[in-house]
Amino acid sequence: MKIAIAQLNYTVGDVEGNASKIIDAINQARALHADLVVFAEQALSGTPAFDLLRKTTFLELCEDALVEIASCCDGIAAIVGLPILTERGTVSAAALIQDRKVLRYVGKRHITARREMGFLVPSKGYEYATVKGHKCAIIVGDDLSHERDFDRSVETVISINARKYGKGMLSHRYELMRSLAFVEGKNLVLVNQVGGATDIVYDGTSGAFNARGELVLMMKNFREDLQIFDTEGGQEPVVVPTTINDRTRMLYEAACCGLGDFFRKNGYEKAAVGLSGGIDSAVVACLAVAALGRENVRALLMPSPFSSDHSVEDAKALAERLGIAYNVIPITEIYRSAIDTLKPVIGGTEFDATEENIQTRIRTVLLMALQNKTGHILVNSSNKSENALGLCTLYGDTAGAFSPTGDLYKGEIYDVARYINRTFGDLIPDNILDKEPSSELHLGQKDTDTLPPYEVVDAILYRMIEEGQHREEIINAGFDSEVVEKIHAMIMRNEKKRFQFPPVLRLSSCSFGHERLMPLTNKYGD
């Protein structure tokens, strides 16, 4: 049997548009002489749909569109993911279409993602179906490790999914698939969504294993694709990418995909970036150009009394290499006017974070003015290290409509920057890569004035956040106890800032506010 795997980019709520994509893919699969075409979980609705899954009218739209899709299935079977309303609630289901009729629904069993809890109810999980004389097991959902002991007559397991991208998760996903195919001695087909859905990005990377557990088909990352898997064999094994260079490439492509789809699916066209001459805004500007085109990106360079000349020149050089429009708008006069106006309140006190934060908030006022006047949507330039520690100003550099890099540690920002220069030429000036990190909010300021180098900070943060290690474990691993305690205190103290961030594209296995969800008000000391 020839199975067409249709890996498509869907838009949440756009039932008509999603159905049109599905019908086009059915026609393409038929032209390739496929017997069956398979689409991802919740393909018709898009996902995560949240409260849309509770709206009867929305669910009826999905089922009406499914009938239209079925009418187009002349001479080809199809499996389409959609939400359906049952007596127990809304189920994420796979609809099996044969002979232009919807024959049955297979419901998802394991509701594991927070974005689904409270919106979906569990169902059976998998069922058997015979297509063109070929017996299949159809699975809905992302937990292949739960599915075992299939009927011996089953030849192929088909899993429809909506699996978000996360660093290191691809290897884990494919190891589960390889193990299931090998242990069960059956072909295994997985189809995944691709594209951005607000703070989630789906990587695609659908594929197929033969009954020997060999990966014989792996589809594109972060792009739509349609390929044929022949259950009769004959396809050569391929290798799953696992190197660090592939991981950095995937991070870059995920960020571009998520940023681009956030703009396109929300009807935005143009982006604004505040360029400081630092590494974070440099990487975000490169991502915006790659995702939206240089003609749609505009930068403001806003030096303060404490900005170094080389930072302004570095930011100019970056903008010119990228070919984006930019303006240099010094904020010195605005800053001094604000300080003079506040003299009755803060006069006679020592310079501290108050004066630093005023600079950052002035920059945000100017960037938001650009957004309001010209429609250039502000893109945030944060990183996970500074977000974790609170080294960011509320209503200042935490502002923006979307953050494509806020889930990347500082060291990963540098990795992505070097990947950009290796791959696309030296877009980011060496000075930006080589200089010590600094927000330049007072004379001679460097991040290392209060913290060890970021490679140490990031290692501690990763252990605390992604691995959930206690401070004692981290200290026993060889890290300085005072530094560990300080970093822990900074994380706990700055939860209030993270509650007010823009949407942050989730690129890690443990994102703030999702996999790591802490109460804003709490007295827990560990």
Image (cartoon, rainbow, N blue to C red):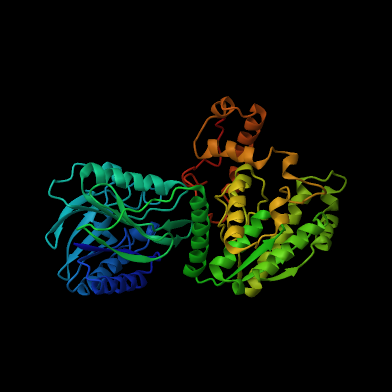
Tell me if residue 366 can be seen.
no
- Badge count: 0
Depth check, front residue: 353 or 412: 412
Q: Quadrant of residue 352?
A: top right
Against 334, is 214 above or below? above
Q: Is residue 59 left or right of residue 455?
A: left
Q: Residue at x 24, y 49 (%)?
A: 123
Quadrant location of the N terminus? bottom left
Against 394, is 268 above or below? below
Q: Quadrant of residue 172?
A: top left
Q: Which residue is outermost to the right?
A: 348
Against 332, is 487 above or below? above
Q: Is residue 72 left or right of residue 445?
A: left
Depth check, front residue: 517 or 3: 3
Q: Is residue 510 left or right of residue 239?
A: right
- Residue 427, percent from left and from top: 65, 63
Quadrant location of the C terminus? top right
- Residue 10, percent from left and from top: 38, 65
Tell me if residue 385 can be seen.
yes
Depth check, front residue: 334 or 455: 455
Q: Residue at x 65, y 61 (%)?
A: 426
Q: Residue at x 60, y 41 (%)?
A: 458
- Residue 37, percent from left and from top: 25, 65
- Residue 212, percent from left and from top: 24, 47
Q: Residue at x 44, y 61 (%)?
A: 222
